[in-house]
Image (cartoon, coloured by chain):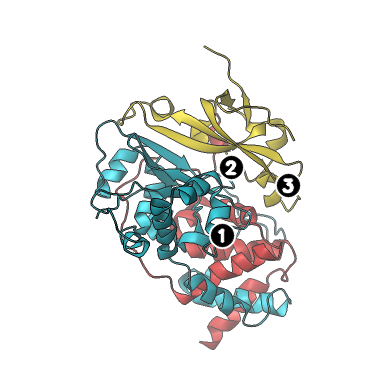
Amino acid sequence: MSETDRGHHDIGGDAAGPVPREEHALAPWEKEVDAIRFLLGQKGLMPADKLRLGIEQLPAEDYRRLGYYERWLASIAWTMEKDGVIPRGSFAARVAELEAKR
Amino acid sequence: MPHDSPHPDEHDHAPDDPSFASRPAIGARALRELLEEAGVLAPGEVARQVERMDTITPALGARVIARAWVDPAFKAWLLADGSAAVRTFGVDMGATPLHVVENTETVHNMIVCTLCSCYPKPLLGIPPDWYKSVEYRARAVREPRAVLAEFGVRLPEGVAVRVHDSTADLRYLVLPRRPEGTEGWDEARLAQIVSRDCMIGTALPHA
Amino acid sequence: MSPRFAPGAAVRVARERPAVSRGRQHIRTPHYVRGLTGTVAEVVGPFRNPEGLAAGEDGLPMQVLYRVRFPLGAVWDRYGGDPSDTVDVELYEHWLEPAHAA
């Protein structure tokens, strides 16, 4: 099988260290992201496979660097813009706007 | 797989390096606001869903296991049609059928999603961080016994490990063996010894 | 829709992508079973094809999903566990072919 056909998320069998056992309680924003995806799925706007595709399309270095729900956020924002549910560029613009107000 | 620098006008490339990465809470708020403004989400809808999610914990799954331990007919139903059986506990598996796998004298089941983090959330709630980790996803199918040893599980002689890679539409629940020393216990008491990890396959219940 | 394979059937996972999956950005066949032979543990039933759903399509025609069992000793070189250890993987019918006895 050609190695280039393997997504960077397809990691079954890779060498890895001890399983990290420390658990963290989800932050409110993480729960919101989970809830948003669930609701979008219920409304037929974002089945789970679109979430997965968005995550799989992240550059490999982002996949490793970003936290779990950060990947979800990137995937949902990208997909919603790509599908025209929210205007293109609106996510980055809104983030900048909210950051400026902090 | 390398990605070229995206052209500014061409949107259908991979998602860009998100500037929100250092302030993800702002990103979540931006997304919610935009979706509300687009009329996709009603105000308060996300908050209500978060509240619903907060009510689902592994204790719910533990009650299902305890019922299966005391009621052979329920156990048979759970194994034959997991989604239908857990509906009696108010659990809606939605489009992902629940597949329950039974630990026996000769088989120990262990669940992983190597491709992402598929998990029976309507029954057990949010998965633990370790379940989503690169380390667990990579090693559970490669060296399950070594991973089990890290979790403190050593299996008796003659027990095979059966790993389930949750790659598609099913969601999995491990039905652990009822431990010795629990004879005569009622369901509530039995449920207390069923931890979340027992239902993923990385722990064994003890009296 | 009639499943092509019965429980107990020996099946081989496609090494290269099946024709309908070429060019798809999202697949659910993990790399580590590609080209391998396993045994059908269960015929799960028909589901919409996630490769299409991820692309915003309707995922039709549905594909029959199977749980296929592989001995871990056959999946990995120098598997360190028991010869009876296995992995069950959910695979869609279009990724499977009948395996011929060696």
Q: Position of residue B65 (x, y in %)?
A: 41, 55
**Three-letter code for the amino acid on which mark 2 is drawn:** Arg
Mark in the foreground, 1 or 3: 1
Q: CA distance from mark 1 to mark 3?
A: 27 Å
For mark 1, what is the residue?
B87
In the image, which disc is placed on residue C28? 2
Q: In this rendering, does residue B56 appear at all?
A: yes
In the image, which disc is placed on residue C59? 3
Query: Color used for chain B?
Result: cyan
Q: Closest to the observer: B80 or C4? A: B80
Task: Pinpoint the chain carrying mark 3.
Answer: C
Which element carries disc 1, helix, strand or loop?
helix
Query: Color used for chain C?
Result: yellow
Which element carries disc 3, helix, strand or loop?
loop
**Three-letter code for the amino acid on which mark 3 is drawn:** Gly
Are discs 3 and 2 less than 8 Å apart at CB?
no
Q: Closest to the observer: B137 or B112? A: B112
Q: Quadrant of the C terminus of chain B?
A: bottom left
Query: Color used for chain A?
Result: red
Looking at the image, the residue that sits furthest to the front is: B184
* Left or right relative to B107: residue C24: right
Q: Position of residue B118 (x, y in %)?
A: 51, 52
**Three-letter code for the amino acid on which mark 1 is drawn:** Arg
